Amino acid sequence: MRSASRKQDQEPLTQRLTDGGFRFTPQREHVYTVLTERRDHPTAEEVFIRAKKGMPEISLATVYNCLDALVKCGLVKQVAVQRGAARFCPNMEEHGHFYCDVCGSVFDMELPAGQGAPVTMPKGFTVDHYEIAAHGFCPDCGARKKNVETIS
Amino acid sequence: MRSASRKQDQEPLTQRLTDGGFRFTPQREHVYTVLTERRDHPTAEEVFIRAKKGMPEISLATVYNCLDALVKCGLVKQVAVQRGAARFCPNMEEHGHFYCDVCGSVFDMELPAGQGAPVTMPKGFTVDHYEIAAHGFCPDCGARKKNVETIS
DNA sequence: CGCTGGATTTAGAATTATTCCAAATCTTGA
DNA sequence: TCAAGATTTGGAATAATTCTAAATCCAGCG
């Protein structure tokens, strides 16, 4: 469950897609490339915009389809957000997310190594993976908030 | 940050709303009651349906408004889900959530006591709270999956 | 006790995010 | 090379949430 990610990163995209029961297509490759080029957390819409740069004919429906395939193959993570569009994360290393509750940005968060499973589940539940998240203010929004308070 | 929840539970709804800058209204009280009557994780739509039982004239927009107010006052939690409608959780004790990736149900999950903060954030980030979640199969879906595999 | 301003409710319209659809195109395996 | 099935595309449809404007309610004030 922990980290086969080193090995996974090396395996060619084609193989991972095939293993997941998907075909390799130029669109899927392109979406994957666009996503891994930057270590941020774009929405499907943002991926679409970036993808159009190198592949102008790609459609939004295809971007959704590709993202879905990539997530199912474990090549990309989908991060759950409270409101608004889903975001995608190309970082497959074990890590958590920090959510700024003011501006909505998402940051990758290192987890202390070797923490082990954070919980033991009752009988019958099968855990596939854990998610650890923190909510609060990012540096920018924390600073802005302090200013407002000082002024008022 | 940990658990003032015992004290909070006792404080009357009116007070908590006022403290949060909201007025006490029959609708907000009703939505809160409906939500705390059951320890599950309904969507806004489901809360709306339950709320109409005792208050037939309430509107969906009001339910959204009430939920928003309750969340902002710390009387209810909003849980982030990967897809579909947001869910609300009346359990304000410290706990995690288990998400069944097959049927989408959400279960409360006890956390081992006194774990402490799961991470230390880089300078500039202010953490308000943590969220610990597990994904996998719930007992029902785990069983169903096994059957399918056996059959095929 | 009646007014006034601002908060709240309501119903419905509008918006946002995502999924569905059908036709055209592409891929894979025989 | 062909056929079957997967994929892409653009647009329509759906789902979830937010916005809007008018009506109502409430607290504080004179």
Image (tube, coloured by chain):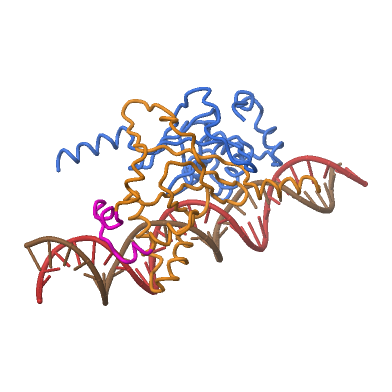
Chain colours: A orange, B blue, C brown, D red
Q: In this view, does A49 lie above or below A12?
A: below
Q: In this view, does B47 lie above or below C25?
A: above
Q: How many marks?
A: 0
Q: What stretch is highlighted in magenta?
A: A12-30
Q: Where is residue D10 in the image (x, y as percent from the top left)?
A: 39, 74
Prevailing secondary structure of the magenta residues: helix
- Apparent side of residue A106 relative to residue D22 in the rendered image (left or right): left
**Which quadrant is home to the N terminus of chain A?**
top left
Q: Where is residue B30 in the image (x, y as percent from the top left)?
A: 58, 37
Q: Position of residue A140 (x, y in %)?
A: 66, 50
Q: Is residue B50 above or below residue A74?
A: above
Residue A14 belongs to magenta span: yes
Residue B132 belongs to magenta span: no
- Apparent side of residue B42 relative to residue A5 in the rendered image (left or right): right
Q: In which quarter of the image is residue A48?
A: bottom left
At x 52%, y 54%, the residue is: A84
- Apparent side of residue D20 relative to residue D27 in the rendered image (left or right): left
Q: Where is residue C3 in the image (x, y as percent from the top left)?
A: 84, 52
The one nearer the camera, B104 or A131, is: A131
The one nearer the camera, B19 or B24, is: B19
